[in-house]
Image (spheres, rainbow, N blue to C red):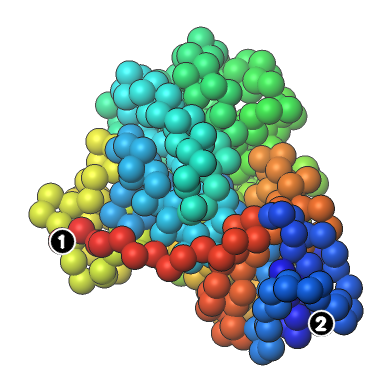
Amino acid sequence: MIFKNGEILLGDFAFKKTDIRIHEGRIREIGDNLAPYEGEETFDLKGKYLVPGFIDIHIHGAAGEDYSNGTVSGMKRMASYLASVGVTSFLPTSMTMPMDELLDLYKRTEDFMKDEENEGARLLGIYMEGPFFSFDKRGAQDENYLIHPEKAVFKELLDASKNTVRIISLAPELPGAMKFIEEIDKSKVTVALGHTVCNYDQAKEAFEKGATLVTHLFNGMLPFLHRAPGILGAASEREDIFCELICDGVHIHEAAIRLAFKLLSEDRIVLISDGLSTMGCPLDYTPKGGYKSGHRRIFLKDGAAKLKDGTLAGSNTPLSVCVKRAVSFGIKVESAIKAATINPAKVIFMDHETGSIEVGKLADLVIMDKELNVVKTFKEGKEVQPFSGYFPK
């Protein structure tokens, strides 16, 4: 297959009018005026953008399903919906739950990863969000199951997942946390700081011991103050720290989005959806008792996903829409897309395979119109079918 006549966001994250050839699931050639082989399909991109497939490394659920509910059918439904909105790879993100439920969930995840019939987004591994969090910044995490970091607990979960945990988020001020960070094999698992009341010095020490990611910057942490700069202050002083942003227009003010990009640069921001089961569901409807997310119930209130008591939970905004909103806030198109593609790929050590349009990489691609709406998604060169699943009533 050849894509022609469009503006293609190449590996340097600059748009160029050129052509690309896809063969056997990978990008095989990039060049001007590529001639199709006999019988080769040609896709006309006139008036459109071609960008890398989006990679959502922090997402709990979508289309009425939630990863923490622990069903393979739910994971499949999530993957199908995500692909239809431009996400070609994702890390399903677990909530704080009882140990036995997490173990069962992680065991089932590997089963889904092996499912060769999954035509939706590719599941790359697990984001372990909890249970090593601060009570004071628990957000929507279940306080009944919060514990201090323990290597033995993590090893049991890692073994259950067949070593597919890619990110673990924790509060570094908890007893044992610094030693825990130090002992993690950070060549395979990325350590993130989140749901924490840590101060600047504690965050700095955690980064020195090998943490390289901040879970949803600004949310679930102490604010930046001129005498207490906190996580943001510590992260801003290093060049090796990535920071997630929920750019849904609800969790963070647009001025803070602009500030983060300016302070940390386009190379260190990772846009995430932090999506919940409400993502993609009708905004004017919540099933009786709410949407199930682990041990929590999520309700749509004024278009936002919240707990029954009004606590803001994750979002219901797809990553592609977060990119569009970032651009509406003043972020360059190229920078916003970079933050949702190659940057998350780097966080989970997958940038050699995906995250940018370069020869040899997987043909995970998204066609967008000039208003940044997703037109078509391709996973490994195959066009993803529109999501046809029902929504809960």
Q: Quadrant of the C terminus?
A: bottom left
Q: Quadrant of residue 228?
A: top right
State the residue at coordinates (66%, 40%).
Answer: 348
Q: Quadrant of residue 74?
A: top left
Seen in the picture, residue 239 relative to 182 is either above or below; the reply is: below
Which residue type carries mark 2?
Lys
- 85 and 265: which one is in front? 85
Mark 1 or 2, nearer chain start: 2
State the residue at coordinates (55%, 36%).
Answer: 125
- 345 and 377: which one is in front? 377
Location of residue 200 in the rendering, given as x and y in whole percent from the top left corner: 64, 38
| Residue 244 relative to residue 148: left or right | right
Identify the element where label 2 is drawn: strand
- Label 2: which residue? 17
Location of residue 30 in the rendering, given as x and y in whole percent from the top left corner: 85, 68
| Residue 381 relative to residue 220: left or right | right
Q: CA distance from mark 1 to mark 2?
A: 45 Å
Q: Residues within 10 Å of mark 1 (few under 14, many from 20)?
A: few
Identify the element where label 1 is drawn: loop
Q: Tell me the tag on residue 393.
A: 1
| Residue 251 relative to residue 256: left or right | left
Does residue 3 appear in this view? yes
State the residue at coordinates (73%, 73%).
Answer: 39
Seen in the picture, residue 227 relative to 40 is either above or below; the reply is: above
Location of residue 116 in the rendering, given as x and y in whole percent from the top left corner: 51, 41
